[in-house]
Image: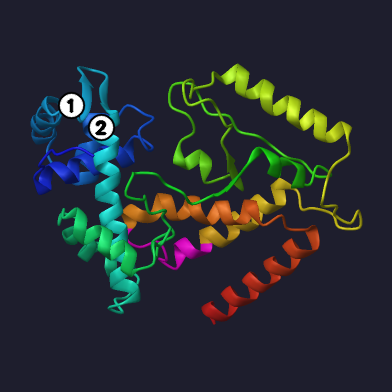
Amino acid sequence: MTNLILSKSEENYLKSIYNLSELGNKVVTTNSISKILNIEPASVTDMIKKLSKKKLIYHEKYRGTKISKNGIKVALQIIRRHRLWEVFLYEKLNFNWDEIHEVAEELEHVSSDQLIDNLDKYLKYPKIDPHGDPIPNKLGEIDFVDKISISDLKKLNYNKKLGFIFGSEASGLSNKEISYANYTLNIPTNDKFKSLNLSHSVIIIAQIISSILNSKVSDFSKSKKINNASKKNVYRLATFVIDNLDKMNFFKPIEKKPIMLENLRSIFYKMELSEKEIRILSSVFAQFLKKKVN
């Protein structure tokens, strides 16, 4: 972890750049930073210079700003502090769900590692905050999807459609991409050669899956009488629910809306609903909203 001392303003800028960059994967424009922080572009330019000198970001004129690896580490620690304070405020001090963000915005700048580690322990190491956002651990890792091993691949149900997502060699999978997965899998490697290129990873997994299918090893089988809902119908239900929640002004604070939408969609896509269940839920939500209107 870095020993850099940052001002409150510098931390706010760095966290915003990290969030705008889709967790470190995109170049961010000065105008987008200006807009999200409600600060004049000239002031943003000055701060970009300061953060560049501290090697927390890289800036290229006319192209934009990209957060560095060290910048990502620092940003994740700020986010960790913020989200742990949100859990504390909500669960222990009984703050309302829509009040905790503003207070945590101030508390996140208390940078005592010992305090935050003890807070994490006191809260029993929560993995998500009250808004559903994942909480990084003290190493900056976001562990909000169950991990499985190579041997666990035998337990998957190959009677239904499965997809494997491989990250790029440069940056791996983003947290946004991981949020759509049911599991994460790391291929074990030799300590002296910890990295695998993408093609080797694909070949290894393909070979293992091929062996499993050929030996017909599958611990789970789903009744053929159950018809899984189409992606189109799941999307329609998710959109129906989200649109109506939006009309009810559910997504607060507004800066949390993108990740809240992401989390909700992820829930729907992971539920493996049948067509019958889609119809039942659609009726339930429609009836609930009808009563709200009346």
From the viewer's perspective, is 120 left or right of 217? Answer: left
> Which stretch did the figure color magenta?
244-253
Q: Are marks 1 and 2 in contact (CB under 8 Å)?
A: yes
Q: Could you tell me residue 241's position as x and y percent?
A: 57, 62
- Dot 2 crowding, Cα within 10 Å, few <14, some 14–19, many 20+: some
Residue beneath label 2, please? 70
- Residue 55 — which label? 1
Q: Quadrant of the C terminus?
A: bottom right
Identify the residue shown where x is 26% and y is 29%: 29
Q: Could you tell me residue 61's position as x and y percent?
A: 20, 17
- Circle 1: residue type: Lys
- Dot 1 crowding, Cα within 10 Å, few <14, some 14–19, many 20+: some
User: What secondary structure is marked by label 2?
Assistant: helix
From the viewer's perspective, is 219 left or right of 103? Answer: right
Which residue occupies the foreground of this view, 112 or 29?
Answer: 112
Q: Could you tell me residue 202's position as x and y percent?
A: 65, 23
Relative to 92, does residue 83 appear above or below in the rendering?
Answer: above
Characterize the magenta stretch by its predominant secondary structure: loop
